[in-house]
Image (tube, rainbow, N blue to C red):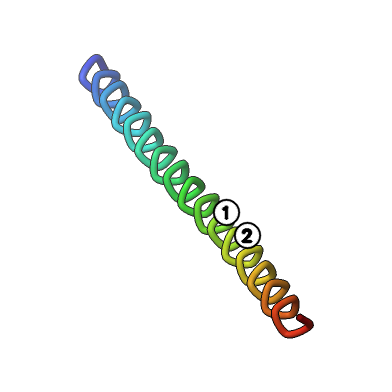
Amino acid sequence: MILFCRFIDSFDSILILFSSFVNLFIYKIHIFDLFISISDKILTSLCHFSIMVERNMMSH
């Protein structure tokens, strides 16, 4: 019985370790996603800006 309890304890700690790794992984994915979203916004605004500048140049 004691052996079984030890096994459960070690299994529990392995699960905790695994879940923390998974959380870290998800966190990294989230940061990556955020980075992509921010860069996408920056690129989009740069495109809009260049289009506006181009239109200004055309009109002058």
Nearer to me, 17 or 27: 27
How packed mark 1 is, by other alpha carbons closer than 10 Å (few <14, some 14-19, many 20 or more), is: few
Q: Nearest the camera: 31 or 41?
A: 41
Task: Tell me if label 2 and label 1 are in contact, CB under 8 Å.
Answer: yes
Specify the farthest residue to the right. Answer: 59
In percent of the image, x 74 and y 76: which residue is there? 56
Q: Residue at x 42, y 45 (%)?
A: 28
Q: Amino acid at mark 2?
A: Lys
Q: Name which residue type carries label 1.
A: Ile
Residue beneath the point at 24% across and 14% down: 2
Q: Position of residue 21 (x, y in %)?
A: 35, 38
Q: Between marks 2 and 1, how big is the CA–CA gap?
A: 5 Å
User: Pointer 2: residues within 10 angstroms few (<14), some, or many (20+)?
Assistant: few
Q: Secondary structure at mark 1?
A: helix
Task: Identify the residue under disc 2.
Answer: 41
Q: Quadrant of residue 40?
A: bottom right
In the depicted structure, whether residue 17 falls above or below residue 49: above
For the residue pair 6 and 25, the one nearer the viewer reads as: 25
- Image quadrant occupied by the N terminus: top left
Give SS at disc 2: helix
In the shown orientation, is residue 26 left or right of residue 6? right
Q: Position of residue 12 (x, y in %)?
A: 35, 27
Instruction: Provide the residue designation for mark 1.
Output: 38
Image-based side of 36 in relation to 51, left or right: left
Query: In the picture shown, does residue 7 fall above or below 32?
Result: above
Instruction: Give the residue at x 38% y 33%.
Output: 20
Q: Nearer the viewer, residue 23 or 12?
A: 23
